[in-house]
Image: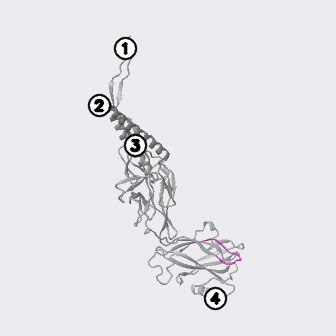
């Protein structure tokens, strides 16, 4: 009878521990990235009252052993690493791993003390660090301003202080029409004659010139308005209408030191450009270079920036009998910009969007995985640490090398199955109840033994 009581006590302890696990699972039914656990039992050592006997020759048959069990103990406490359901949030710092893998986090920005988590409810601190709710840094690789990946695993930063460097303009592509009805004015011998021609055109109904202004950026990001003037100079021997293109002003200042006759454009009777500087093979003609176009401008317009070398492409211009609208519609280069917004892709790349319209990869989130994720040690706050039985962490990029892709703007919900938990709760309660009855019954039997003395 004493054995039965102690067996029941061991079972009460085991069922109480199982109820603790069930209670924790239900408590975390809405915890981001939580992985449910289970408890399994096993019998403990059995006391052998009589061993097994082999069959005798021409005698009795064999006998089975006689044993009395001494209760139960915990066989295992397992964590299920099945993926939970998707909760769409729309926040650009919320991330979900759509398969195997763990985010790598650390309580130091250099990543020296690593933990792992499935909970992707990240945010930004005042310094722009990508962090967990408890302030752990999310680790990955950063890119420098030149777009080169720096393979140093550390805390990722998305700071508003990040800038996009300026790019100096070096290409401008002209498109549109130059009115074929511009009056021939002849070749302008010098720059003063060109300025006078443009001035005289202001009072004419039939003009000889057409001007357009384009914006260029220097190496420091300063913008400069460059005015180009087209002058109808006449007709060549093949009957083509000729126009000379001049850079006339820069930021409102006359480009007096530049030879005004910079390039010559020839259009045929169908309005198509057929020659540039008397070169007829336009496909083989490179864009017209205008090196150091600011050198002839009085004053220090560049303010220490490098002189611009612009390649002007005129090959898309036409000359029809309609109003002039030729312009440099495609000019590269831009000013410096500050970080306006960012997005995180399914491959973990953090792309910054800057105020100058440019985008740049700022960093990339790294993931970890283990040969035995069930062997990880829970440390609280939805985090794990590796153990001797989990194996060492294997690092990689999302959506590459066997790692799952990310789902931005979403979180992984708890994988706790409430229907299963409530079922386990019922069976656990019944098991506890039945074993408590064993103790009660054994006590009554002992009481009867005591009463035999009366």
Looking at marks 4 and 1 on the same chain, the residue that comes earlier in the sequence is marked by 1
**Can you identify the residue that label 4 sits on?**
200
Q: Residues within 10 Å of mark 3 (few under 14, many from 20)?
A: many
Give the SS element for disc 1. loop
Magenta residues span 312-325
Does residue 220 appear anywhere in the picture? yes
Q: Quadrant of residue 148?
A: bottom left
Looking at marks 1 and 2 on the same chain, the residue that comes earlier in the sequence is marked by 1
Does residue 45 appear anywhere in the picture? no
Residue sitting nearer the eye, 233 or 279: 233
Residue 450, numbered circle: 2
Task: Give x and y (percent) for residue 362.
Answer: 45, 62
Would residue 298 appear left or right of 8 to someone viewing this image? right
Quadrant of the image containing the N terminus: top left
**Can you identify the residue that label 3 sits on?**
18
**Can you identify the residue that label 1 sits on?**
56
Please, is residue 12 above or below residue 112 in the view? above
Q: Are marks 4 and 2 in contact (CB under 8 Å)?
A: no
């Amino acid at each position: 009878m004493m054995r039965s009581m102690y067996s029941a006590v061991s079972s009460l302890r085991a069922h109480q521990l199982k109820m603790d696990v069930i209670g924790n699972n239900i408590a975390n039914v809405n915890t981001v990235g939580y992985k449910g656990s289970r408890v399994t039992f096993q019998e403990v050592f059995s006391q052998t009252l009589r061993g097994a006997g082999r069959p005798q020759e021409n005698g009795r048959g064999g006998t089975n052993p006689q044993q009395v069990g001494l209760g139960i103990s915990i066989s295992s406490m397992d964590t299920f690493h099945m993926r939970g359901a998707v909760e769409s949030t729309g926040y650009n710092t919320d991330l979900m791993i759509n398969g195997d893998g763990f985010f790598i986090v650390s309580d130091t920005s250099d990543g020296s003390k690593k933990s792992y988590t499935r909970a992707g409810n990240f945010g930004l601190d005042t310094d722009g660090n990508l962090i967990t709710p408890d302030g752990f840094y999310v680790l990955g690789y950063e890119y420098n301003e030149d777009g080169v990946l720096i393979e140093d695993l550390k805390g990722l930063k998305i700071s508003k202080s990040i800038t996009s460097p300026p790019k100096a303009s070096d290409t401008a592509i002209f498109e549109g029409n130059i009115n074929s009805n511009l009056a021939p004015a002849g070749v302008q011998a010098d720059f003063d004659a060109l300025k006078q021609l443009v001035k005289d055109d202001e009072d004419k109904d039939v003009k000889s010139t057409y001007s357009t202004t384009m914006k260029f950026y220097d190496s420091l990001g300063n913008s400069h308005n460059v005015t180009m003037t087209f002058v109808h100079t006449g007709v060549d021997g093949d009957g083509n209408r000729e126009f000379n293109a001049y850079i006339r002003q820069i930021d409102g200042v006359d480009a007096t030191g530049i030879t005004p006759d910079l390039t010559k454009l020839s259009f045929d009777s169908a309005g198509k450009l057929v020659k540039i500087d008397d070169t007829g093979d336009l496909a083989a003609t490179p864009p017209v270079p205008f090196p150091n176009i600011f050198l002839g401008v009085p004053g220090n317009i560049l303010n220490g920036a490098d002189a611009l070398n612009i390649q002007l492409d005129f090959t898309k211009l036409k000359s029809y009998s309609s109003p002039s609208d030729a312009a440099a519609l495609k000019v590269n280069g831009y000013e410096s910009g500050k970080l306006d917004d960012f997005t995180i892709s399914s491959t973990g790349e953090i792309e910054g969007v800057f105020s100058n319209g440019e985008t740049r990869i700022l960093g990339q989130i790294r993931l970890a995985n283990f040969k035995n994720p069930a062997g990880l040690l829970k440390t609280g706050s939805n985090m794990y640490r590796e153990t001797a039985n989990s194996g060492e962490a294997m690092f990689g990029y999302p959506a590459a090398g066997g790692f799952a892709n990310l789902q931005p703007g979403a979180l992984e919900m708890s994988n706790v199955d409430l229907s299963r938990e409530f079922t386990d709760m019922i069976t656990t309660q019944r098991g506890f109840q039945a074993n408590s009855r064993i103790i009660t019954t054994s006590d009554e039997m002992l009481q009867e033994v005591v009463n035999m003395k009366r």
